[in-house]
Amino acid sequence: MTIIEESIQAASRKYNVDVNLVRAVAKRESQFNRWAKSPKGAMEVMQLMPDTARAMGVRDSRHM
């Protein structure tokens, strides 16, 4: 299992969200690319904006 898949499953459990939904968002937003960055500044797998990531307590969004 990859680190991204482990992270997807952990996020699914933590937030009580269907694992397939978390996986679909990650695929749509970044194609599972940990280094993705949008022209507007959204970053990594889930394409979080830096302020949103900080507000949500995300320390390393490459692993969600």
Image: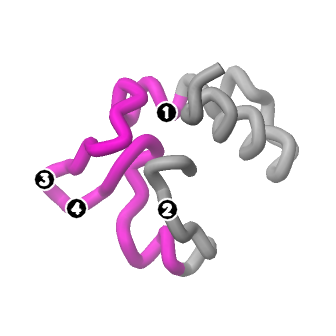
The Cα–Cα distance between marks 4 and 3, rounded to whole angstroms, is 6 Å
**Is 26 one of the magenta-colored residues?**
yes
**Residues tagged 4 and 3 counted as in contact (Cβ below 8 A):** yes
The Cα–Cα distance between marks 3 and 2, rounded to whole angstroms, is 20 Å
Specify whether 2 is left or right of 17.
Answer: left
Q: What stretch is highlighted in magenta?
A: 25-54
Task: Name the amino acid, label 1.
Answer: Ala
Closest to the camera, between mark 3 and mark 2, is: 2
Earlier along the polypeptide chain: callout 1 or callout 4?
Answer: 1
Res. 41 mark = 4
- Label 1 crowd (10 A; few <14 / some 14-19 / many >=20): many
Specify whether 3 is left or right of 17.
Answer: left
**Residues tagged 3 and 2 counted as in contact (Cβ below 8 A):** no
The residue that disc 3 covers is 39
Earlier along the polypeptide chain: callout 1 or callout 2?
Answer: 1
Q: Is residue 35 above or below residue 25?
A: below
Earlier along the polypeptide chain: callout 4 or callout 2?
Answer: 4
- Label 4 crowd (10 A; few <14 / some 14-19 / many >=20): few
Q: Count all numbered tags in the image, as a single digit.
A: 4
Task: Name the amino acid, label 4.
Answer: Gly
The Cα–Cα distance between marks 1 and 4, rounded to whole angstroms, is 16 Å
Q: Judging from the image, what secondary structure is the residue with disc 1 in?
A: helix
Give how far across and how far down residue 21 sits, in percent: 66, 28
Label the magenta part by its dominant secondary structure. loop
Task: Name the amino acid, label 3.
Answer: Pro
The residue that disc 1 covers is 26
